[in-house]
Image (spheres, helix red, strand yellow):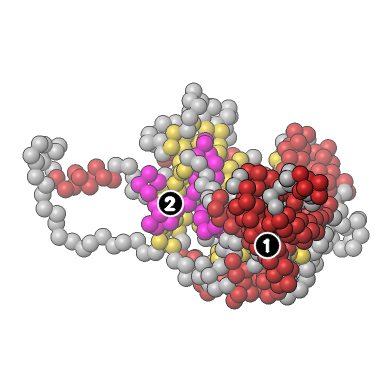
């Protein structure tokens, strides 16, 4: 293989197509989104068509061509017909490589829509200003909230208009829900789930009342309902139900100060691992307390007793002189001098230990190494893998106030520096998972999140964790959907997420010029929360809720009119037509948002 693209087939004349650069899992899912849901021609540019997901991508129906180039050069861009393309997605490579490729592509086609994957979100925001028609997204940042929420056993949330939207299940659903987003939920067969099922209209209750009172006219005071005709009882919907609800604030994980103080005290015990050292220090502490009691008994002044005891511990007390004793100006007699000597000798024992602790704490930070989990680590989440996703998950859990311990085999992983900056303990090493999890204090943990790039490694970590602690919650990153289905059916108190499955819909929508505000997980299914603005010439002009909504695909959950600053949730008027300046917020499936986008393009 050479940079000239040796061994590739030439791209036949194609125009108005989309280009995906990359052969990783995200590129695979993104190509699937584009060809299956948006039904657009796709050309894929890969570095090696025999590695990663490139062979599977090449077999996908609807892919116009797979072109092989070692790097994204000007010649490679010309080979994939960049001049006539409608969009370009850069989902593999470093931030620097993607920036360089995006600017080169913009030079070839100024009107090209460019979406690039960026780990550094702040840099991505600045790059968006340099691109005429571009967006910078982070796949790990998009997927991390779902992993963090799954670890805590609660649904992730998306902030819209000052409210945090989240998914509630069954008994957790309240009367102020926005809409039902899924039914027929069966953990043993997740393929039966129906997303955004058709709901009864707002007038269903009035129709029911009319049928109860019959055809005798409106309801009158003192009217009597007619007896309902006997018939079969309505069948209940099988399986569980999920609904979309809103919170005013995103709940944090409250941890009381008493628990934190207890953890700190236990954590200090890691400096006293030797039984002999603990015996010596406890003996010295008991002697100091007894000497302190003697001093207080002789002087009856608590403040002065503390003062002289601290000076004695530091070796700074002034001894009595013979002349002072002869003159009667000494301190407190023989017993006081004995007590002070005992405190001073014990202070000699404490000083080296305190110095060693200070050197250990300060020295580990200066050596650039993260600290190890201590004996006080309790009720924490173990994150296995400090790649892009693991780093994001650990940081988000830390921000929520949840104790975190990370595990990483590669000492050069980019997430180690971030963990050290946040003060998160990290277990480094390439030993067996059983030993690594023991060091991460699995017995006292609440959950384990395995987010390495290998499905087998993640599954091994999860099974080893469940063997060591049957009560621990496990969240596993898995790419294969069938594998994930067996995982759900086999393990309780477990969850599975796919980074590419979560991120690909956002990348595809961004490539089409739509803004996806976030994604909510219903087990392995994804619900997109998107915000659409009605602009001049947009296909949204003149549409109402009846036109926009599609059972199983799209539901309008909020509207903001051009002259208003507030979102109106579940706006009841389904016939009001949209005008320029209006905004709508929709909950949609991947295919539903794709159909909506295609319809709007056709209308425009």
Which residue is located at x 29 percent, y 62 percent?
Answer: 235
Q: Is residue 14 visible?
A: no
**SS state under label 2:** strand
Q: What segment is highlighted magenta in the picture?
A: 148-177
Report the front residue among 254 and 235.
254
* Residue 164 image position (x, y, % from top left): 51, 43
* Residue 500 image position (x, y, % from top left): 66, 57
Q: Is residue 87 left or right of residue 152?
A: right
Which residue is located at x 73 percent, y 54 percent?
Answer: 337
Write down the residue under mark 2.
Answer: 243
Give the residue at the far front of this rendering: 326
Pick whichever of labels 1 and 2 is earlier in the sequence.
2
Q: CA distance from mark 1 to mark 2?
A: 64 Å
Give the residue at the far top of this rendering: 563
Q: Is residue 336 left or right of residue 544?
A: right
Q: Which mark is residue 339?
A: none
Report the front residue among 9 and 260.
260
For residue 155, above or below residue 477: above
Q: Residues within 10 Å of mark 2 (few under 14, many from 20)?
A: many
Quadrant of the snapshot with the C terminus: top right
Which residue is located at x 59 percent, y 47 percent?
Answer: 300
Which residue is located at x 45 percent, y 58 percent?
Answer: 194
- Front: mark 1 or 2: 1
Quadrant of the snapshot with the N terminus: bottom right
* Residue 371 image position (x, y, % from top left): 75, 58
Q: Is residue 296 left or right of residue 65?
A: left
Q: Which mark is residue 287?
A: 1
* Residue 15 image position (x, y, % from top left): 73, 45
Report the front residue among 79 and 345.
345
């Amino acid at each position: 293989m050479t940079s000239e693209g040796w061994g590739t087939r030439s791209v036949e004349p194609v125009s108005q197509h989309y280009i995906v650069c990359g052969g990783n899992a995200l590129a695979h899912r993104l190509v699937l989104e584009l060809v299956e849901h948006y039904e657009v021609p796709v050309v894929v540019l890969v570095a090696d068509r025999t590695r990663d997901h490139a062979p599977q991508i090449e077999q996908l129906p609807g892919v116009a061509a797979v072109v092989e180039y070692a790097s994204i050069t000007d010649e490679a861009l010309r080979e994939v017909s960049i001049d006539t393309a409608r969009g370009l997605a850069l989902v593999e490579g470093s931030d620097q490589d993607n920036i360089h490729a995006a600017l080169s592509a913009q030079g070839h086609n100024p009107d090209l829509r460019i979406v690039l994957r960026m780990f550094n979100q702040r840099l991505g925001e600045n790059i968006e200003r340099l691109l005429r028609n571009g967006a910078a997204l982070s796949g790990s940042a998009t997927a991390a909230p779902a992993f963090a929420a799954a670890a805590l056993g609660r649904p992730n949330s998306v902030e819209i208009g000052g409210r945090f939207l989240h998914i509630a299940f069954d008994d957790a659903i309240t009367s102020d829900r926005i809409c039902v987003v899924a039914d027929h939920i069966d953990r043993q067969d997740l393929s039966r789930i129906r997303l955004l099922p058709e709901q009864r209209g707002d007038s269903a209750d009035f129709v029911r009342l009319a049928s109860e009172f019959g055809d005798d006219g409106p309801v009158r005071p003192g009217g009597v309902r007619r007896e309902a005709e006997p018939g079969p009882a309505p069948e209940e919907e099988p399986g569980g139900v999920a609904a979309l609800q809103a919170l005013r604030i995103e709940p944090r994980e409250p941890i009381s100060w008493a628990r934190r103080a207890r953890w700190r005290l236990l954590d200090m015990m890691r400096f006293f691992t030797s039984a002999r050292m603990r015996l010596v220090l406890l003996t010295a502490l008991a002697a100091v307390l007894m000497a302190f009691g003697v001093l207080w008994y002789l002087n009856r002044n608590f403040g002065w007793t503390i003062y002289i005891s601290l000076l004695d511990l530091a070796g700074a007390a002034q001894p009595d002189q013979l002349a002072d004793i002869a003159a009667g100006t000494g301190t407190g007699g023989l017993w006081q001098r004995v007590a002070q000597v005992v405190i001073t000798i014990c202070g000699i024992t404490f000083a080296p230990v305190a110095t060693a602790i200070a050197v250990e704490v300060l020295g580990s930070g200066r050596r650039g190494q993260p600290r190890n989990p201590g004996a006080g680590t309790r009720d924490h989440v173990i994150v296995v893998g400090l790649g892009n996703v693991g780093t994001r998950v650990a940081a988000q859990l830390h921000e929520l106030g949840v104790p975190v311990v990370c595990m990483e085999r590669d000492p050069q992983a980019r997430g180690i520096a971030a963990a050290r900056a946040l003060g998160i303990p990290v277990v480094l090493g390439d030993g067996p998972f059983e030993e690594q999890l023991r060091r991460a204090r699995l017995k006292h943990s609440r959950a384990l999140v395995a987010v390495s790039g290998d499905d087998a490694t993640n599954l091994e970590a999860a099974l080893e964790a469940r063997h060591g602690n049957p009560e621990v919650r496990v969240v596993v990153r898995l790419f294969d959907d069938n594998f994930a289905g067996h995982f759900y059916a086999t393990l309780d108190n477990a969850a599975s997420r796919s980074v590419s499955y979560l991120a690909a819909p956002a990348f595809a929508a961004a490539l089409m010029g739509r803004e996806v505000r976030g994604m909510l997980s219903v087990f392995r299914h994804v619900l997109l929360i998107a915000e659409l603005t009605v602009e001049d010439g947009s296909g949204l002009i003149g549409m109402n809720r009846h036109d926009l909504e599609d059972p199983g695909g799209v539901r309008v959950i909020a509207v903001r009119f051009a002259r208003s600053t507030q979102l109106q949730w579940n706006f009841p008027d389904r016939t009001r037509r949209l005008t320029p300046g209006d905004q709508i917020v929709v909950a949609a499936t991947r295919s539903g948002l794709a159909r909506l986008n295609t319809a709007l393009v056709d209308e425009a």
